[in-house]
Amino acid sequence: GSSTDIHVAIGTRGFNTTVQPDLDQNGANGMYHTTFPASGCPASWTLQNNGWPAGTGSGNATTNILGRIDIAMSPSNPDVIYAEVGSITTFGLLGVWRTTDGGATWEQRADVNDLTGCFGDWSQNWYDQGLAVDPNNPDNVFMSTVDLFRSTNGGDTFVNLTCGYAGGNDVHVDHHALAFVDASSDTLLVGSDGGVYVTLNADAADPDAVAFTNLNESLSTIEFYSGDITANFATSANPGINAGAQDNGSSVYVWNGAVGPAEWQMTTGGDGMFARIEPVQGLRWYQESQNGGLKVSTTGPFGTYVGAAGAWFGDTLSFILPYEIYKYNCIGICNHMIAGTNRVWETIQGAVPTSSWHANSPNLTKNTLGNRSFIQQLSYAVSDATIAIAGTLDGNVWYGFEMGQGVANSATWVNVTGSNAVLPNRPIMDVATHPFIPTTGYASLGGFDENTPSTPGHVYQVVCNADCSSFNWTNKSGNLPNVPINSIIVNPRIPTQVFAGSDWGLYYTDDITVANPVWVHFTDGLPNVMIWDMAIDRGFTTLAVFTRSRGAYAWPLPGDPVAPFENMHFLPIVVRQ
């Protein structure tokens, strides 16, 4: 073997939160270099601050101006390295630096004033960054921000190739990833919030001639936050799906409808969040944009969506405000809905009019996470719309009784957290109830066991008496991996069968009642990606799964326990994105 030079960029998104205090910076941001010997570990790291702003890597947080840093090395000349740097104060582009001597000296080549084309930079370099150097020409470099830029003069100036907000070439904004294919200068893959695109003439002399092809019709890359399916989905003559996606609005998918072939069709814009469907008449379709912007169409999936939000904007609330509709035992129409800020809001008129929303709980959080202390998920009990369960990002679980009276603060809420003596003090990502015993509930947790070593696990069951004046928590994580469980749901046809959507795909157990449930990992038809939401239709025919990077999937809900890896193939709901 031989020694290997390693270059590392130390940066930060530029701001910390109560939830993520380690995102703050300590003045160490900058470029570092070491040489790995043929065997063993490197002796030390060297700060490469020649040509960087004063204070870089000094350890003094007050003098550092560097935020997030992304780097890329030239494949044809490894001495040439580029660094894209975000500003720790403006969160936009601070500049592009380059070294031509392997990092010994650096030079700032560009700043935001050197970006040309339809738009300049946006203040999102904490989120949108990335670099790739032409494999055959060290002077050609591609840079991700909100749009995709190209330089052909060693990073001195950059031209916007995509112009996402100016009616450009239909490449989605918010760029993150770049990769050349087969050492070719002309074939470049581009990853953004809209999925994957490819250009086959990345090296075209005229930047306006660079053309892109959308690859998402076959790849299924949509980033769903949430979704719902119509009643009796598997047997309906006209089933439908409603779903919200990151930076891709909310879309519906209807078979055999008047709109033509089945395909995803966007109905509201922005960031699509929670999506729900009134199941009896099927005419009210609810969609949501960021920060609680709830809307409803009362004439079906392709109707006009109008505001349906409550007066909750003064509360502490999530970017992805959770809400639910009770859809099982209602007759005629399902009108009972709940939404979560730091307290529970309820309407018994389906949010029509919006004034029908009223606060129906006190603050259910610990108030320990600043503006992140809010309800992460909530749900009505499957068998009883007068009972609800809610979980907060700061580790609380509450049961609500006497729901559905249509009167503000008429419900009674009981904190069943138990001081987190058994239930881990980590984010409660989702909650659910037993289909027939409403005071038996489940909580799925985020974070990792290392955060709460004395209370490990990611799936817990609570068993209460009738009013939850007494309760008992049990760890039901069994053989689940130590990864966040973002969604949990119980099969109403088999109450012992529970599904858990994780950061690493979907798991289920056929018997949640045993001390250490055996969880089986779905491996057929469903990718091992982050699952944020699941839905079971009224009629209990289908389980729908909504993933954070690979689209949506549906599976016929079993009426009998499932033998491991038998009859488990998920069908992707993907035609167009």
Image (cartoon, helix red, strand yellow):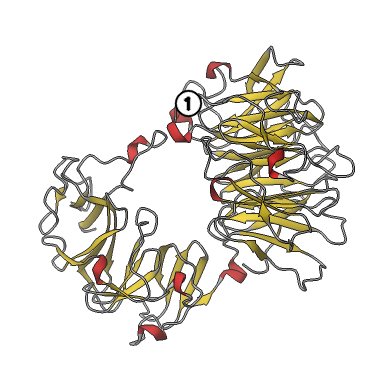
> Where's residue 191, x and y in %?
46, 65
511 relative to 372 in the view: left or right: right
325 relative to 507 in the view: left or right: right
Return the residue at label 1: 367
Residue 83, placed above or below residue 38 = below
The local crowd at label 1, few if under 14, some if 14 to 19, many if 20 or more residues have their Cα within 10 Å, is some
Residue 334, placed above or below residue 247 = above
Nearer to me, 13 or 99: 13
Q: Amino acid at mark 1?
A: Asn
Q: Is residue 282 visible?
A: yes
Residue shown at 34%/72% (left/top)?
149
177 relative to 293 in the view: left or right: left
Residue 65, placed above or below residue 401 = below
Q: Secondary structure at mark 1?
A: loop
- Tally of marks: 1
User: Which residue extends farthest top?
Assistant: 470
